[in-house]
Amino acid sequence: MSEDVYDLKLERTLDAPRDLVWRAWTDPEHIKRWWAPRPYQTPECEIELRPGGKFHTRMTGPDGFDFSGTACVLEVAPGERIVWSTTMKDGYRPNEFADDGCNGFPFTAIHTFEDAGDGKTRYTATVMHANAKDRDAHAAMGFDSGWATCAEQMAEVARELAQTA
């Protein structure tokens, strides 16, 4: 069986130029504005754009939801690609996992950014899981709708950046 059957994928053409979508994805102050689907928020974000760097976020919600996670940046190709994994925290140190519904499964995320013409960006997020159980748990959490909402919120931030440039 091909391992890509354990992947979840989001592909969107965002109405914003690639350089600004990249800025929205890589600046912690911008990430805080789009990382969690509204009305949830991201009051904390730290990202070190280098292999072995830290990618940390904390999300909160009106229902009392409060979750922090730290991942390891594996690859950065400026303007084109970011790869990070929850299997590790910064410095490639292994992460611990608890079956708490949010942090119960490891995954690796590959984000690509391509020019789509007319000032638009082709954004793809591929999230790789170790097995069907983890993939299904992530899907059940609302991967499709949640990540799509966040992608559009990211495009909103990028369009706002265009207005202030």
Image: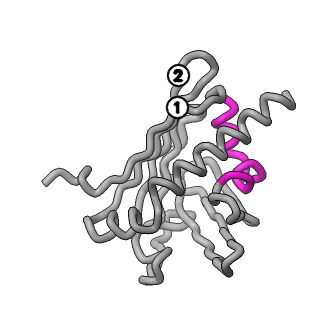
Q: In the current view of this chain or complex, which residue is farthest to the top?
A: 118
Q: Pointer 1: what residue?
A: 13
Question: At numbered mark 2, what does the secondary structure look like: helix, strand or loop?
Answer: strand
Q: What amino acid is at disc 1?
A: Thr
Q: Nearer the viewer, residue 165 or 146?
A: 146
Image location of residue 103, percent across then percent down = 48, 75
- Residue 18, position in %: x, y? 62, 28
Would you say 137 lies left or right of 100 here? left
The residue beneath circle 2 is 116
Question: How far from the left and from the top, in percent, is residue 125?
Answer: 46, 45
- Across and down, in percent, residue 81 comes to 51, 38
Farthest residue toward the left? Answer: 1
Badge 1: few (under 14), some or many (20 or more) residues near its Cα, within 10 Å? some
Residue displayed at 44% across by 79% down = 97
Tags 2 and 1 touching, CB below 8 Å:
yes
Residue lying at 50% horizontally and 54% vertically, measured from the top left: 145
How would you classify the magenta stretch by its main secondary structure? helix
Magenta stretch in the rendered image: 19-34
Residue appearing at x 46%, y 78% in the figure: 101
Badge 2 amino acid = Ala
